[in-house]
Image: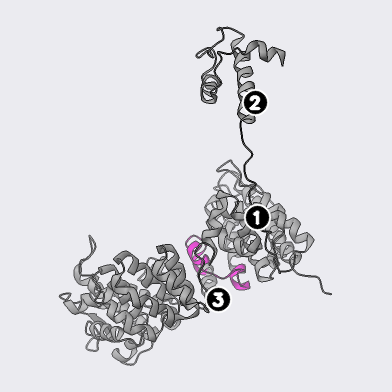
Amino acid sequence: MSRTTAAVGPSLPDTWEDLVTAALLGTDRRTPAGCAPGPGAPVALLDAAAAATVRRRAGLRPARAARRPQPAPEDPRPPLPPAAARRLALLLSDRPGGSGGGRRGTAPDLMELLPQWLAAANARGFAAPPAALPALLDAARGRTDLRPAALRFAGPRALWLARFNPDWRFALRSAPGESTSVPGPGDPEGIDRLWQEGLFAERVALLTSLRSREPSAARGLLAATWAVERAEDRLMFLDSLRTGLGPDDEPFLERALADRSRNVRATAAELLSALPDSALAGRMAVRAGACVAVDHTKDTPTITVEAPHECDAGMERDGVVAKAPAGRGERSWWLGQLVEAAPLDSWPRRLGGRTPREIVALPVADDWQGELHAAWCRAAVRQRNARWSRALLGEPSAPEAGGPGAVSLAERAELLGTLDAADRAEWVAGFIETHGLSEAFQLLGVCAVPWAAPLGRAVVDALNIARDAGSYPWSFSGVMGLAERCLDPSEASRLDALLAVPDEPEDASPGAGSYWAEAFQRLVTTLRLRAAMLEELTPAEA
């Protein structure tokens, strides 16, 4: 202490900002006031900082003690089995490698297994271990796709914890009723007050929550203030009616067709066209039917198309956009909008009682097939019509199924989404058996997980064929990654024969054989790990 007293004279500054500035710049560039330049300057600066610190602390008055936070709420769900808790800690501790590219080796990608683990844990109703909550929140912060499942698993204690860390505030915004405090169904006054006075995000959350449990009440709330809402807000509010959309919504949506905002009119028309019995759907059926007919004078019945020559006021009111995009013909643009908005069930009556499969099989004159079939695809997806989707998909073994054909692969993927899981898997399996894996990636993405046995076998067989043919292995890495996450774990035993390094054909890519062996080893290891994960999450029999 005597050294400090001797070094720090009365003229040495005790302003904290001056001391920090001198420390940042360095005493060679800025010598503290009251001491000579030279080797003793750094010591004098530190001594001055120590003295200033004592003065600052001595001059502070004790602050009022902060209110102790409320205890974390209880989580009534059963705890994880010990083995599953250890597995969760391992999955959360994994971090993506920093190499960016290159070979992955045989180790499973644990972070890609975390979504499946969370889904399984949530399905079984387990509570998250308290010690894992920070890591869970960090993982959800870094990956938005994890947030719904991670926050559901983390439960009420994670929301309590998120209030103490700004990095975790997303959890409060993402959790229903947290940031917005949505009133319950027994609080009509609270609902009305929040709707009248709340921020936009709070009102959207309120409308969405109310729509999920009382569709008519949500529609009534929206109708009460519709005339005074901003156009961009009306568009967002209207989009909430997709949940629970039904015939009772038609009168409100019909009034929205006269809205001053074009985007609002278009959304209202889209929603009405998803109601096959609506008046708008009937008007669109008449317009579309006037453009499409069957010509029986030819040797083979042929669909003929006469696209609209104008877009009149009635069409515009019903959501038809008059101005075509650049490079698109106006008449074909109008035709596509009419056909996609017309009820699909109206076409068999207008086209000679034919089934959807028979209608799709008819030739179309004057190169209108692509436009007509694309519009029917959009209608099938919008109206969730599995019968028409199946007809437009055609047989997976047909040559045109591999593209380009009248229906693109992207459209086929959307059509598959309207089928049940078994039909979807069967069609994609047939597609792979005929056309291979090169075009199947986006089709596999719409199939239910785990893949059904026929689909899993088709994928593994196609990968084996590609390996034996000496194909460029890295072009299949996307499908291999999907297989790791989507194959049924019970398929692991069938893959043991594929683990050896194959003989490489002369024209094969260098090192392809060892790459394939690594990839199949990683696939087998991942499948067995997934099986172990599910077993750990299965409660032992009492």
Disc 2, SS = helix
Specify few, some or many for label 1: CA neighbours under 10 Å numbering under 14, 14-19, or 20 or more: few
* Horizontal side of residue 64 vs 440, given as left or right: right
Q: Position of residue 257 (x, y in %)?
A: 26, 77
Q: Which residue is mark 3?
A: 421
Give the CA separation, mark 2 to mark 3: 72 Å
Residue picked out by circle 1: 69
- Whether 66 is drawn above or below 380: the answer is above
Closer mark to the observer between disc 2 and disc 1: 2
Q: Which residue is disc 2 drawn over?
A: 54
Residue 446 among those drawn in magenta: yes
Mark 3 secondary-structure assignment: helix
Indicate the amino acid at tag 3. Ala
Compared with 496, 344 (above or below) is: below
Q: Position of residue 218 (x, y in %)?
A: 42, 77
Q: In the image, residue 282 lies at what x, y percent?
A: 29, 87
